[in-house]
Image (cartoon, rainbow, N blue to C red):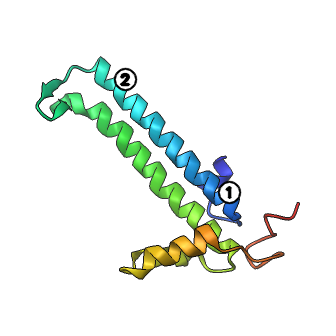
Amino acid sequence: MGNLLLTHEGRINRGKFWLALVYYLLTMAIVGVVCFVLSLVIPGDPGSDGFSVSGARAIPFVIVVFAYLIFLCWSGICVGIKRFHDRNKSGWWILIQFVPVIGPFWYFVEAFCLKGTTGPNRFGPDPLQG
């Protein structure tokens, strides 16, 4: 799993790209459970808008969420690069997401929907071939 999520070299097919998305959702649920357990351990202030902590009591929550966000950003970049490599495009194509209006749609179609290059390309062997 580490090779899928933490390196930007090689290629991945659509199935592994969708698998990475499922993994992100599962890790988000785990982070939610960890924050819930922290809320039971660390005393907070029940307010009209729900549970809240401030000051030094918020540090464990900030550390957990910030660590998850760093992992999510790095891993998302790596997985996106590998998916564009499978399409025989440079990893820089992940920046298409930042083009207003059309960018996110383009990224979705390229990464989630279109088939990769058949056979080996300049980024490595075909992930669908043994």
> x%, y% of residue 43?
21, 19
In the figure, 68 relative to 120: above or below?
above
Marks 2 and 1, Cα distance to the nearest angstrom? 31 Å
Q: Which residue is mark 1?
A: 16
Sequence-first tag of 2 and 1: 1
- Is residue 78 visible in this depiction of the protein? yes
> x%, y% of residue 80?
57, 66
Rate crowding at label 2 as few (under 14), some (14 to 19) or many (20 or more) other CA atoms within 10 Å.
few
Q: Residue at x 64, y 66 (%)?
A: 82
Say which element carries label 2: helix
In the figure, 95 relative to 69: above or below?
below
Q: Is residue 107 shown left or right of residue 44?
A: right
Q: Which residue is mark 2?
A: 37
Disc sitting over residue 82 in the figure: none
Which residue type carries mark 2?
Answer: Val
Residue nearest the viewer, comparing 113 with 68 = 113
Q: Is residue 40 shown left or right of residue 95?
A: left
Query: In which quadrant will I find the C terminus?
Result: bottom right
- Is residue 95 visible in this depiction of the protein? no
Q: Is residue 54 shown left or right of residue 81?
A: left
